[in-house]
Amino acid sequence: MEGDKRNLADLLKDGGVSDIPDFIGTLPMAVKKRVCALKKFQLDSIEVEAKFYERVHQLEKEFEAEFNKLYEQRRKVVAGEYEPNDEESKLPIIHGLEENEIKVITSSHTKRENQRGLTAVL
């Protein structure tokens, strides 16, 4: 119900629970206290979560320039505008393979030197 501003009692009535005050009146005082405490804990939790996500946002802004630099480097490689050097391409093409399997994969290739970007892989 987008934009619905009704209170909880109205929403529960729609669900078939019509006498909320009467029902709550039948609960023991200890149960009512627990429910109120749980509501408070939930609100406290929401406040902590809001602080958490504010800090996450601050960290994202702090590291945005570094990420953007890396994303731009990746974009250039994918578009064929930049050819990685030996140091940048030092990682194995597939992690977890044994050394002899890596040698087979890296030694067998077709020459497509004139193609650029990831289309050269296809």
Image: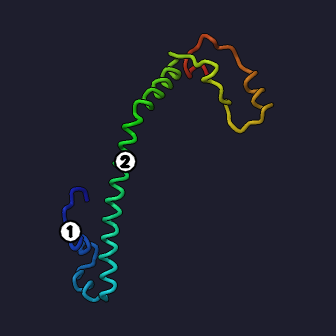
Q: Residue at x 33, y 54 (%)?
A: 50
Q: Which residue lies under the disc numbered 2?
A: 55
Q: Answer left or right for 38 relative to 78.
A: left
> Closer to the observer: label 2 or label 1?
2
Is 1 situated left or right of 48 in this image?
A: left
Spot the residue most to the top.
114
Residue 74's tag is none
Helix, strand or loop at label 2? It is helix
Q: Is residue 111 visible?
A: yes
Tell me the element at label 1: loop
Q: What residue appears at the point 31 percent right and 59 percent down from the top-left corner?
A: 47
Expressed as whole percent of the image width and height from the top left, the position of residue 120 reads 59, 19
Q: Position of residue 76 (x, y in %)?
A: 49, 20
* Residue 22, quarter of picture: bottom left
Q: Which residue is pictured at 50% across the width and 15% down the height?
A: 81
Q: Name the spot of residue 49 as percent of width and height, x first.
A: 36, 56
Q: Residue at x 58, y 19 (%)?
A: 84
The span from disc 2 to disc 1 (Cα, nearest Å) is: 32 Å
Position above or below: 71 against 53: above
Q: In the rendered view, would you say 43 is above or below 25? A: above
Image quarter where the C terminus lies is top right
Residue furthest to the right in view is: 100
Residue 122 visible within the image: no
- What amino acid is labelled 1 in the image? Asn
Number of numbered discs present? Answer: 2
Earlier residue among tags 2 and 1: 1
Residue 7 is marked as 1
